[in-house]
Amino acid sequence: MNRIRIAVVGVGHLGKEHARILSALPEAELVGIADVNNHQARSIADRCKTTAYESHEDLLDIVDAVTIAAPTLYHHKVARDFLERGIPVLVEKPITTTLAQAEELVEIANSREIPFQVGHIERFNPAFEELTRRPINPKLIESERHGPFTGRSTDIGCVLDLMIHDLDLILSLVRSPVEDVYALGAMAFGGHEDIVNARIRFENGCVACVTASRISPRPKRKLRIWASEGYAGIDFVDKRLTLVQPSDEVRRRGLSQMELDPNRREQLRQDVFSKHMETLELDCTREMDQLTAELKHFVNCVKTGRRPRVTGDDGRDALALADRILASVQRHPWDGVLDGPTGPKHMPAPLGKLFEDDSNEGREAA
Ligand SMILES: NC(=O)c1ccc[n+]([C@@H]2O[C@H](COP(=O)([O-])OP(=O)(O)OC[C@H]3O[C@@H](n4cnc5c(N)ncnc54)[C@H](O)[C@@H]3O)[C@@H](O)[C@H]2O)c1
């Protein structure tokens, strides 16, 4: 196969970036884009020097592969039409709206051995890639993903919109079945949850505490891991990886402050991070952005027939965990009793205001 004839379905906020990048990849030929919004389709097609189509069905006979960035509600129908024709698919996250839909797509792709990738883009974040090159067996994970209110992806809540990125990353690191989940969350402006915290316990003893919010003033995307090997912290925004590990000396002999005399205890306090715990700060920024890396990887998988880094099975597993979290969020009793307010739509009545509108204190804090 020479250049992969590829198309993009849905060229809104994210899909237009797929089209821009694919139109410039030497190993691909962007043969078309499809969007139900005619005006959007034509404007992006002009910009990317390709052909605009109204329906994804117009692309079925002219492509070797497709990327899908239509709203999540349409992922199942559109992806199935391509997979049933034996055409490789990259579908944006979340894979589908329901688990049954995801199972069906995975079954079609696996039975026909078609490359089927899901757009969990943080797997291509260079800081995360750097971490996966090192041995680590996480026992406690904390993740925070905060984003500003964008008004987009209103067909889903923050679990399927944001948290699902971290669920996929955590599942890829822990590789153990989930034992149980406890979660709570609240709705602010949309018809779905906008902020959620979940505690996930795995059968291998690892615990993950995961928070996602799409109503935060400042973006924040962090993952912290504690393990026998040491500590790893990732800042996905700055693409920085911080690693901390015990020195060889501590690894060999251990170190207990109880066995030290008072002077040596004081010395220990001063030397912890200079002598006994080694720290490595890595700036992992690179020239190629994550979306380009992800799309190049997909095109390469189509060319070689290799399984993608993030398969349909991975997308389905992340969705299955997201579903358990959403079910737990719905059950959470805010006042601790089942006949009180429960779930993201019914918070307890507020006790009062935290500050007055005209208070200087309030303005300063904001
Ligand atoms: N990987 C990531 O980090 C990431 C980031 C943002 C969005 N997403 C995902 O990408 C998808 C799109 O999100 P967005 O923010 O770009 O949405 P958007 O609303 O900006 O764009 C969606 C586009 O799809 C078009 N469309 C709707 N139905 C269609 C259909 N049946 N066939 C063809 N086109 C159709 C719309 O007209 C629109 O132009 C969602 O699934 C979202 O969850 C992923």
Image (spheres, rainbow, N blue to C red):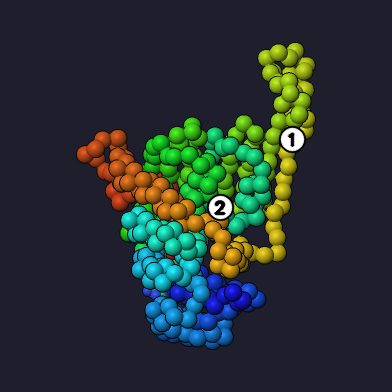
- Of badges 2 and 1, the one in the foreground is 1
Callout 1 crowding tier (Cα within 10 Å): few <14, some 14–19, many ≥20: some
Q: Quadrant of residue 301?
A: bottom right
In the displayed structure, 199 sits above or below 271; it is below
In the displayed structure, 216 sits above or below 197; it is below
Q: Position of residue 208 (x, y in %)?
A: 49, 39
Q: Is residue 208 visible?
A: yes
Decide if residue 134 is on the left or right side of residue 45: right
Q: Is residue 295 visible?
A: no
At label 1, the amino acid type is: Glu
Disc 1 target residue:
278
Residue at x 73%, y 20% (from the top left corner): 253
Residue at x 45%, y 53% (from the top left corner): 313
The answer to whether mark 2 and mark 1 are in CB contact below 8 A is no
Determine whether the beta carbon of the residue marked 1 sits less than 8 angstroms from the nearest atom of ligand 1: no
- Label whose residue precedes the other's in the sequence (2 or 1): 2
Decide if residue 48 is on the left or right side of residue 274: left
Q: Nearer the viewer, residue 365 or 359?
A: 365
Residue at x 72%, y 45% (from the top left corner): 281
Q: Nearer the viewer, residue 24 or 344?
A: 24
Determine whether the beta carbon of the residue marked 2 sits less than 8 angstroms from the nearest atom of ligand 1: no
In the displayed structure, 50 sits above or below 343; it is below
